[in-house]
Image (cartoon, helix red, strand yellow):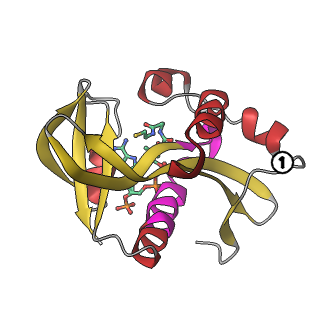
Amino acid sequence: MSTTLRLEQITPANVDAALALRVHPHQEHNVAPVVRSLAEAYAFGETAWPRLIFDGDELVGFLMAFLDIQWNAEKDPTDRRSGLWRLNISADVQGKGYGRFAVEALREELRRRGEQRFYVTWEPGEDGPGAFYDKLGFRPTGEDSGGQVVGVLDI
Ligand SMILES: CC(C)(COP(=O)(O)OP(=O)(O)OC[C@H]1O[C@@H](n2cnc3c(N)ncnc32)[C@H](O)[C@@H]1OP(=O)(O)O)[C@@H](O)C(=O)NCCC(=O)NCCS
């Protein structure tokens, strides 16, 4: 694993490369494209936290966190959560530990912000990322969020 891995903000200099990031075609139903995430980041303001994942000069992926959002206002207005909203590792560099790095980096960021739990939702199914999150220690909460599995990790 490289020691030059880092998260970077989206800037005028890197936005074109960010928009060109692609997962494998058979994975596209598991995650929104970066262009949609950046539009949502604009709309959601402070509650969205988009970052690019670099290995040295190479852009290898994108993540977006949600920060302190009201989860299900009707069920429990006090239930506020933070976690991983999107994770796109470039198709040609998957399987090299970049996804794990992204999750660990976000875990550190959430810890810094005083969070105790790290949430994520994912598409169920064979070619979904469930086995990846399982490996990283996330456990299903038993909830369903629009057909997606809800997972949680203690920080
Ligand atoms: C899921 C995804 C983020 C994983 O990123 P990655 O960089 O390929 O994963 P890593 O190399 O960091 O893998 C970490 C561990 O998870 C395992 N893993 C990764 N993907 C896996 C999969 N689909 N099934 C089983 N295990 C998997 C790896 O083998 C590795 O285990 P190890 O440490 O024992 O070797 C990436 O495949 C991706 O972008 N997929 C498409 C979009 C998507 O589904 N995003 C998630 C949206 S919620």
Q: Is residue 93 left or right of residue 121?
A: right
Query: Would residue 97 be visible to someone looking at this image?
Result: yes
Quarter-wise, where is residue 42 in the image? top right
138 in magenta: no
Q: Is residue 146 left or right of residue 75?
A: right
Q: Quadrant of the N terminus?
A: bottom right
Mark count: 1
Q: Quadrant of the C terminus?
A: bottom left
Boundaries of the magenta span: 88-106
Give the residue number, with chain letter if any, for mark 1. Answer: 14
Query: Would residue 96 be visible to someone looking at this image?
Result: no
Q: Residue 53, image x and y in percent?
A: 65, 57
Query: Residue 27 or 144: which is nearer the viewer?
Result: 144
Q: Residue at x 23, y 55 (%)?
A: 152
Q: Is residue 109 left or right of residue 71?
A: right
Whether the residue under disc 1 has CB within 8 Å of ligand 1: no
Q: Is residue 31 left or right of residue 3?
A: left
95 in magenta: yes
Q: Residue at x 49, y 70 (%)?
A: 109
Q: Is residue 140 above or below residue 4?
A: above
Q: Is residue 11 above or below residue 75?
A: below
Q: Residue furthest left?
A: 142
Q: Residue 107, image x and y in percent?
A: 41, 68
Q: Residue at x 58, y 33 (%)?
A: 40
Query: Residue 41 or 45: which is nearer the viewer?
Result: 45
- Identify the main secondary structure in magenta: helix
Q: Residue at x 60, y 45 (%)?
A: 45
